[in-house]
Amino acid sequence: MRDSSALTLAYFEDSGNLRLKKTLSTGQASIDTSNGGFILKDGATVVAYVDTSAGNGGAMKINGSLTTSTTPQTSAGNILEVRDGNGSLVAIVEKDGDMTLKGTKSENYDLLN
């Protein structure tokens, strides 16, 4: 994900690692999206959000919890599935805002642009 200046703010790697320019907040009952950004919804409920604004860009919020180093499973409850070049599932976000990564999460990551 990039901001309006094309600076990289967050990305998933083929290995299932999540790299964030800022931090990840979990268990967010209400997610403010007024700065604009990448929004995942289940109906009218925002379950995941990546801020792409200047200053806060690269911060991610999810309603649920984060599980790492676990192979994600395909489910009707998934609203985002990330696959590697071979089509294998490496990350998911579910309707309740839970996120599973095959790899790990890195916050405040020095993203090369």
Image: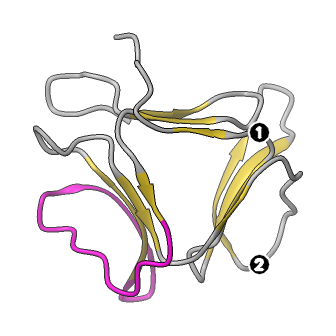
Above or below, 45 against 34 in this view is below
Most common SS among magenta residues: loop
Please identify the quarter of the rendering in which residue 77 is found: bottom right
Q: Position of residue 79 (x, y in %)?
A: 61, 69
Q: Earlier in the sequence, mark 1 or mark 2?
A: 2
Secondary structure of the residue carrying numbered label 2: loop
For the C terminus, give its image quadrant: top left
Q: Amino acid at mark 1?
A: Gly
Q: Position of residue 86 (x, y in %)?
A: 86, 28
- Residue 2 painted magenta: no
Q: Position of residue 48 (x, y in %)?
A: 44, 67
- Residue 40 painted magenta: yes
Residue drawn at (62%, 71%) of the image: 65
Residue drawn at (40%, 18%) of the image: 110
Q: Amino acid at mark 2?
A: Ala
Please tell me which residue lies in front, 55 or 97.
55
Residue 103, numbered label? 1
Please tell me which residue lies in front, 2 or 58.
58
Please identify the quarter of the rendering in which residue 98 is found: bottom right
Q: Report the side of 87 relative to 21 (left or right).
A: right
Residues drawn in magenta:
26-45
Q: Report the side of 109 relative to 50 (left or right).
A: right
For the N terminus, give its image quadrant: top left
Secondary structure of the residue carrying numbered label 1: loop
Q: Report the side of 48 relative to 89 (left or right).
A: left
Distance from the alpha carbon under mark 1 to that under mark 2 = 22 Å
Q: Position of residue 93 (x, y in %)?
A: 62, 64
Residue assigned mark 2? 76
Above or below, 24 against 78 in this view is above
